[in-house]
Image: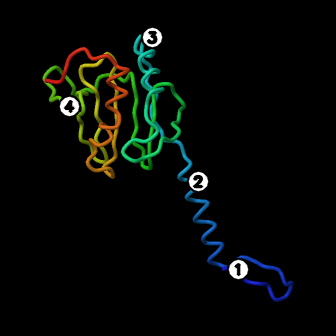
């Protein structure tokens, strides 16, 4: 709503316009924030693989657009709000071992950890461990893995298949 100020004859913003501007500014501020993803520190061979993977990742994952990551890293990526995150060259999760259940999605084996607000998936049987965290907002969470399968298969060599 714009109204004319009777004493000076110029237009001044009304309360609705001010409220709308404040809300819009907050949405831009919150929406423009980078996703926080801890940066892994892989060895040299794994780092080369991870750089190749990150450069091959899609701009859209589970219908969510790519977004900036903080701290900036060659080994991480994120999509959407809340962020679906990927980190390549991570260390093995504490619960993951040779007997861990392997879930295959489009030819990529995954170890899954259900947590309070998300599911964290870690690749199994690849030369580099890739971890994808999908917030519970996205259901089913495995949809994100479908979009990430092709670049992982093409850039991260398989050591053993999911059994």
Marks 4 and 2 in Cβ contact (< 8 Å):
no
Label 4 sits on a secondary structure element that is: strand
Total marks in image: 4
Q: In terms of sequence position, does the residue under pointer 3 or pointer 1 come before the other?
A: 1
Q: Is residue 31 above or below residue 15?
A: above
Q: Provide the residue designation for mark 2.
A: 29
Give how far across and how far down residue 32 sits, in percent.
56, 49
* Marked residue nearer the N-terminal end (3 or 2): 2
Quadrant that contains the N terminus = bottom right
Find residue 31 and report its horizontal and vertical position in percent.
53, 52
| Left or right: 46 as drawn, with respect to 18 | left
Label 2 residue SS: helix
Q: Which of 157 and 30 is in front in this view?
A: 157
Instruction: Tell me if mark 3 has few (under 14), some (14-19) or many (20+) residues whose alpha carbon lies within 10 angstroms of its own.
Output: few
Q: In this view, does 110 lie to the left or right of 15?
A: left
Counting residues from the start of the chain, the first of labels 4 and 3 encountered is 3
Name the colour scheme: rainbow
Earlier along the polypeptide chain: callout 4 or callout 2?
2
Return the mark for residue 104: 4
Question: Which circle marks residue 44 in the picture?
Answer: 3
Q: Choose mark 4 or mark 3, whichever is in front.
A: 4
CA–CA distance between discs 1 and 2?
25 Å
Q: Could you tell me which secondary element the residue under label 3 belongs to?
A: helix
137 to 98, vertically: above or below:
below
Q: Distance between the residues labelled 3 and 2?
A: 37 Å
Label 4, label 1: how far apart the Cα atoms are: 57 Å
Nearer to us: label 1 or label 2: 1
Q: Label 2 crowding class (10 Å Cα cut-off): few <14, some 14-19, many 20+?
A: few
- 3D distance between C-alphas at marks 4 and 2: 38 Å
Residue at x-position 59% and y-position 63%: 24
**31 over 131 or under it: above or below:** below
Q: Report crowding for label 4: few under 14, some 14 to 19, many 20 or more residues within 10 A (C-alpha).
A: some
């Amino acid at each position: 709503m714009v109204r004319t100020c009777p004493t000076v004859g110029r237009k001044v913003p009304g309360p609705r316009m001010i409220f709308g501007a404040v809300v819009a500014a907050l949405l831009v501020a919150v929406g423009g924030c980078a996703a926080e993803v801890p940066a892994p520190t892989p060895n040299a061979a794994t780092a080369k693989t991870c750089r190749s993977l990150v450069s091959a990742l899609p701009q859209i994952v589970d219908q969510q657009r790519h977004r900036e990551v903080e701290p900036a890293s060659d080994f991480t990526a994120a999509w959407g709000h809340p962020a679906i995150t990927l980190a390549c060259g991570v260390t093995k999760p504490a619960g993951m071992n040779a007997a861990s259940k392997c879930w295959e999605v489009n030819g990529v084996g995954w170890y899954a950890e259900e947590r309070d607000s998300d599911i964290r998936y870690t690749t199994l049987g690849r030369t580099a461990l890739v971890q994808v965290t999908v917030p519970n907002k996205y259901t089913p969470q495995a949809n994100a893995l479908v979009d990430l399968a092709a670049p992982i298969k093409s850039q991260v060599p398989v050591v053993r298949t999911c059994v």
